[in-house]
Structure formats: C-alpha cells, structure tokens
Amino acid sequence: MGRTDQDIGTLLVFSEGKTVCALASNEVQEVVFLPELLHPPGMPSLLEGVMTLDGMAVPVIRLAALLGIQAPAIGVYTPVIVLKDAKAALLVERVEDVFQPVRADLVPAKDGQSFNGCVIAETRHKEKDIYVLSVDRLLLEEEKTRLAEFKALAEERLNRQGLAVS
C-alpha cells in the first residue's frame, strides 16, 4: 500500500471546511500566509493564482477545488502550504497541528476510497478523523503536465518583467 507500509513520519494537519487532512512533513517546504497572487490569462481552473517565492513562480492550488467542496473565504492570514521544491502550493483554510502518529493508528485507505487514490491512510488526532494525502496523487498526470507547463510560462513572464531569480 505504498507509504503506509513504512513509517509515514511527522504529519502537518490542515483543514478546509469540515475536512481535516494531513501531509507528511517531508513533502512540505514551508507554510506562509497568502501573498498577493497573480492571475495570468490561461490559468487552469484548479488554480487560485500564482505567487512568487524567492523569484520563482509557484502555482497555488485551492484544496477545496480538489476536494469538490465549497471554498471558505480567503483572508489576510490564510495559510498556503508550499510543497517540496516549490513545484506548487496548497491554499487551505487552516493549519491545525504537527504530530507524529503511532504507526498502529494509521489505517491504510481502501482502493477506490478517494479520487486518484490521493488518500493513502486515515488516522485520528485530538478527536478528529484525518485523511493522510499523497502529494504525488493529488493531481492526475494530465493536470501535473498542464501545471508544469503553466509554471514555466509564469516564470517566463516573471523573467521578462525582471522579477525572477536567475
């Protein structure tokens, strides 16, 4: 069953509406407050916008769009989880906690339980059910390709404007 066959490590717990999810902390680069987002033409619908981080274009995906739930309002202190290597970021309603689950408390997800198998396990923490997500399975291959192409275009625009780091 992939990642749940071994220690999953420390989890970053976050929520969007009533849905509580987690990512392995080694898949997260950093958490920042929502910066000003660029909205270039041709932006894929799953994106909230593009932020710049250290001169790089980082596509910001709204978790609610991936989960198919109504998105809560965005505020000044809305957290953005920047994924490893800044390939993309997840805009979430709230970052809740960091914890190390006991391996015995991780229940592997059943096949077909989630879209594209993005939920790899479930656990409980502070009386909440938590869905452990796989970064690699959040997007379909076609979406990953489109996102990478869009990121390259956004970085090219930043270069032309002199805003990107070479």
Image: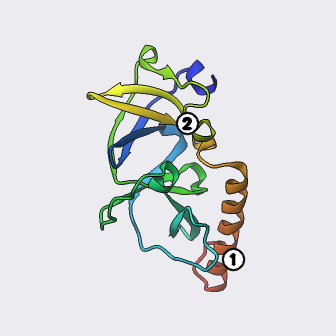
Snapshot quadrant of residue 111: top right
> Percent position (x, y) of residue 7?
53, 21
Q: Nearer the viewer, residue 109 or 105?
A: 109
Which residue is the extreme one toward the bottom?
161
Which residue is the extreme one toward the top?
104
The kind of residue tagged 2 is: Ser
| Residue wearing tag 2 | 114
Snapshot quadrant of residue 135: top right
Q: Residue 68: which disc? A: none
Q: Where the N terminus falls, by quadrant?
A: top right
Q: Nearer the viewer, residue 82 or 4?
A: 4
* In contact (CB < 8 Å): disc 2 and disc 1: no
Q: Nearer the viewer, residue 19 or 135?
A: 19
The kind of residue tagged 1 is: Glu
Q: Residue at x 40, y 24 (%)?
A: 101
Q: Residue 156: which disc? A: 1
Left or right, residue 79 beside residue 5: left
Q: Nearer the viewer, mark 2 or mark 1?
A: 2
> Percent position (x, y) of residue 159?
65, 79
Above or below residue 117? Residue 5 is: above
The colour scheme used here is rainbow
Q: Residue at x 65, y 73 (%)?
A: 155
Q: Where the C terminus falls, by quadrant?
A: bottom right
Q: Residue at x 57, y 38 (%)?
A: 118
